[in-house]
Amino acid sequence: MENKHGMKSNTIKMVLRNKINDWLDTLPEDMQHTVAEDVIVTGGAIASMLLGEKINDYDIYFRTKDTTHAIAKYYCTRFTDESKPANGVSKSINPTVRLEVKKNIKGEDEERVTIWIQSAGVVGENQEEYKYFESQSESSTDSYISSLEIDDQSDASIEKIEDLIEEFKPNKKVKYRPVYLSQNAITLSDKIQLVTRFFGNPEQIHRNFDYIHATGYYDYGKDELTVPAEAMAALLSRTLIYRGSLYPIASIFRIRKFLERGFRITAGEILKICWQISELDLNDKEVLQEQLLGVDQSYMWQLISALKSVEGKVDSTYVAKLIDGIF
C-alpha cells in the first residue's frame, strides 16, 4: 500500500497563500485589499493536505457581510457578462444577489447573502440551453443535471509540491472565472469555491460545520494556520465526530463520501445526527426545502420545486411519491 505523507504547516500555509494571491490578482484593484483582509480558508482542503490526499477544491469564506455581498455581486455580474450564446448559456439567465434574514433550525435570525436564479436555482458555464424543471420530462431534467459540469483543468496531487505549482501556470481559458452558481456558493474554475451562505470569524463559521475534522482554517490576512487539537485527532484516527449542524440531513448524505475515503463513524455519532433530524418538522415544507438545499441544490431542485406548489404542510406519503417519481 502506497504511503501518503501529509504536509507540514509551513507548507500548507505556502500553498494556500500562493493560491489566494493568485486568485486575488484577478479581482479589480479596488476590491483586492478589502477582500484580502476578510479571507478565511477552511474545510476539506486543509484536511486533505494534512492527510496527504488530493485537494478537490479550496473553500473560501469571508469575515463580513459586506465583503461577501460585494464578491457575490461581482461574480454574478461577471457570469452574466461572460455568458454568450457560443457556450450554450442563455442571456436570459441573470443571477441576482439578495440580502435576507431567515430563521435557522435553532430559531435564530440569520443574515444571509443569497444568489437567486430564476426557477432552476443553479446555473453552470457549460450547461445546455436553459430550461425550467417543472416544464420538462424526467429525461430532459437528467440531461440538464449532467450538463452542469465544473471545468476542473488541474489534476494536482499534493504528494509533490511541484505538482501544485502547476496550478499557477497560465492556461488558455480565463483563470478563476465563475463556472457554477447556486443559492449558497459560487464555484470558480481552478478549484476555488466562494461560500456566501455563511460569513463571520472562524468560530462563527464553524458553528455551521457538521464534522470536526474539517475545522482547521487559514487566516489569509494574518497568514496564520490553525488546526484545533480535536480536529487533528479526528483526522489521525479518520473518525467522523459530529458536532451538530444546521443541515443534519446533509450530514447523513455526506457520510457516504467520507466512508469512501477511509473514514469511520460510530453508531453513537449517527444517533446524534438522527436525534437532531427528529427535532425537525419535516412536514413543514419550508423546513424541508431548507434542509434539501443543504444536500445538493442541483440534484434536489425538482423536489423543491414540486414542494413549492403545495399549499400548507406535506406528509411522508406525499413526499415518498414525489421522490419515487423524480429519482
Image: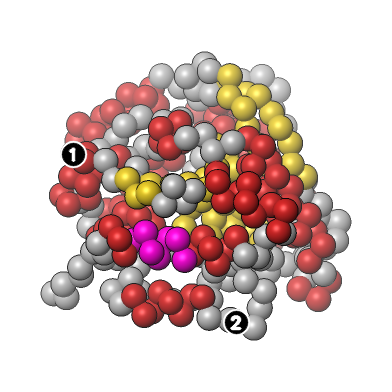
Farthest-out residue, top = 107
Three-letter code for the amino acid on which mark 2 is drawn? Asn
Mark number, residue 266: 1
Residue 82 located left or right of residue 69: right
Q: Is residue 54 magenta?
A: no
Residue drawn at the location 37% of the way across and 49% of the way down:
224
Spot occupied by residue 134 in the image (x, y as percentages of width and height): 74, 47
User: Residue 111, percent across and down?
Assistant: 62, 27
Distance of mark 1 from mark 2, alpha carbons?
A: 45 Å
Relative horizontal placement of residue 168, taking residue 124 as reference (left or right): left
Q: Residue at x 80, y 59 (%)?
A: 80
Q: Nearer the viewer, residue 117 or 39?
A: 39
Q: Most prominent secondary structure in the magenta stretch?
A: helix
Q: Which residues are magenta?
A: 12-18
Which of the two marks, 1 or 2, is nearer to us in this view? 2
Instruction: Report x, y in % for residue 166.
Output: 46, 80
Whether 245 is drawn above or below 17: the answer is above
Which of the 4 quarters of the picture holds residue 260? Answer: bottom left
- Residue type (three-letter) at the residue carrying disc 1: Thr
- Establish if 303 lies above or below 283: below
Tally the numbered discs.
2
* Residue 173 shows in this picture: yes
Tell me: 183 left or right of 221.
Answer: right
- Quadrant showing the N terminus: bottom left
Q: Position of residue 172 (x, y in %)?
A: 64, 83
- Residues at badges 1 and 2 in contact (C-beta under 8 Å)? no
Q: Is 14 a magenta residue?
A: yes
Residue 171 badge: 2
- In the image, 27 versus 214, the foreground residue is 27
Q: Secondary structure at mark 2?
A: loop
